[in-house]
Amino acid sequence: MLSDTIAAISTAVGEGGIAIIRVSGPEAIIEVEKIFKSKKRLSEVDSHTVHYGHIMDPLSRDNLEEVLVTVMRAPRSFTTEDVVEISAHGGVIAVKRVMDLLLQQNIRLAEPGEFTKRAFLNGRIDLSQAEAVIDLIRSKSDRAFSVALKQVEGTLSRKINDLRYTLVETLAHIEVNIDYPEHDVESLTSEFIKDKSKFVMDEIDKLLKTAEEGKILREGITTAIVGRPNVGKSSLLNTLAHDNRAIVTDIPGTTRDVIEEFVTINNIPLKLLDTAGIRETMDVVEKIGVERSKHAVSEADLILLVLNASEPLHEDELELMEQIRGRQCIVILNKMDLPSQIDLDIVRRYYPDELIVPMSVKAQEGIDRLEDAISKLFFSGKIEGGDLTYVSNVRHIALLKKAKKSLFDAYEAAEQYIPIDMIQIDVRLAWEQLGEILGEAVGDSLIDQIFSQFCLGK
């Protein structure tokens, strides 16, 4: 597969100032040279240089597009192969013309994620760094982007490699004592294994403690905005999204379906779900919306329960508070700009004061308090900064847990003075499981599955 040359559009398709087409492979420079007319031949130019010219139909010799071509020679490129990037005018027709000509040469269309896959297979990055590229592209907040960028740069890889080195030292110590048993003091070897196993387990625990926050940074908090009709749910969504995303009227039941919107609050990505007002209704369409609202509530990580503070609590609201008791929930007392009629003592039976936020969405009051409440609920008020390595990938988390279990078995065996050649099996297994995070000894099917999640030109 790596012996052929591939091409794909690396920028979003559509109108824009510029579009970039990437070509990678052993014939990249030679094949692009066949359709590129300039003062210099691409095969003769230096690496990492940019050249002005035209894409030309090799048969008619007509100029089809005015371009800039960047040449990056192996191994100093993202894929470690020869790479040519063609910067054309942004537009469907311009890009199509260039791509059509490229695919008429000895070049094929790249598969999703194939450029990054080649970077992995050629040893430029490991599998954890490749997976972080997806997170980088899909980042929904500055903090999520920063965390993903650190992983692309290898912070997690270095941490895993350090732990594996500790295990290699342990395995080497065991091997020496197996080969030269006459010099072995069994109790000292057992203590050495226990110390090293505990150290690595503690380090794995530190990584696993970041998993929940890492998952939030990576995927966002699924947040359902619920309440009776006309309490201000859609207005809250529009306020948080800074856009008129949902229709707002004084007519109860306006929202008939679940509306999704991504927003960022205090660097925390939220996937907001504006739901239909929950109430008993005979309207068939609204009834479907209410059922979808209940499903959204059951799937949500966070519930924003909106109550109308200018009215007494309704029986439907009491029932709803009972149903979501024990869930991650913030109660919003909306319409506080009007005379209050709500019985706060009843609300406090379900939720403490720190989870009750007085607001007036119409007057834009209380938004800061809501943002702070969300931040404190999930991150104790802030997301850790500095060089903290977050683990968010489900595959990484599962392998870390397996490695920890293997080391726990080794620790227990060492405490019971089980022969060290038996303990060695568990230590080696932990070393291999940590290696799988980096892409060592993983199957082709897993690699294909991971890279199929990428966009075509990455």
Image: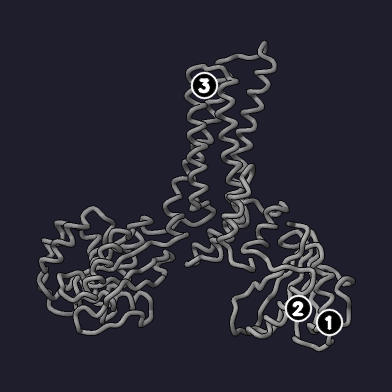
Whether residue 225 is situated above or below residue 1 in the rendered picture: below
**Label 1 vs 3, first from the N-terminus:** 1
Quadrant position of residue 352 = bottom left
Q: Is residue 240 left or right of residue 267?
A: left
User: Is residue 332 in view from this perspective?
Assistant: no
Q: Which residue occupies 70% across, 74% down?
A: 21
Of residues 285 and 382, the one drawn nearer to the viewer in this rendering: 285
Which quadrant is the C terminus positioned in? bottom right
User: Residue 351's spot in the image, x, y percent?
Assistant: 20, 58
- Asked whether the residues under the numbered discs 2 and 3 touch, taking CB atoms below 8 Å apart as contact, a structural biologist would say no
According to the image, label 2 marks what residue?
Answer: 101
**Label 1 vs 2, first from the N-terminus:** 1
Q: Residue 58 has which mark?
A: 1
**Label 2 vs 3, first from the N-terminus:** 2
Q: Which residue occupies 14% across, 56% down?
A: 349
Whether residue 24 is situated above or below residue 206 in the rendered picture: below
Q: Which residue occupies 48% across, 30% down?
A: 408
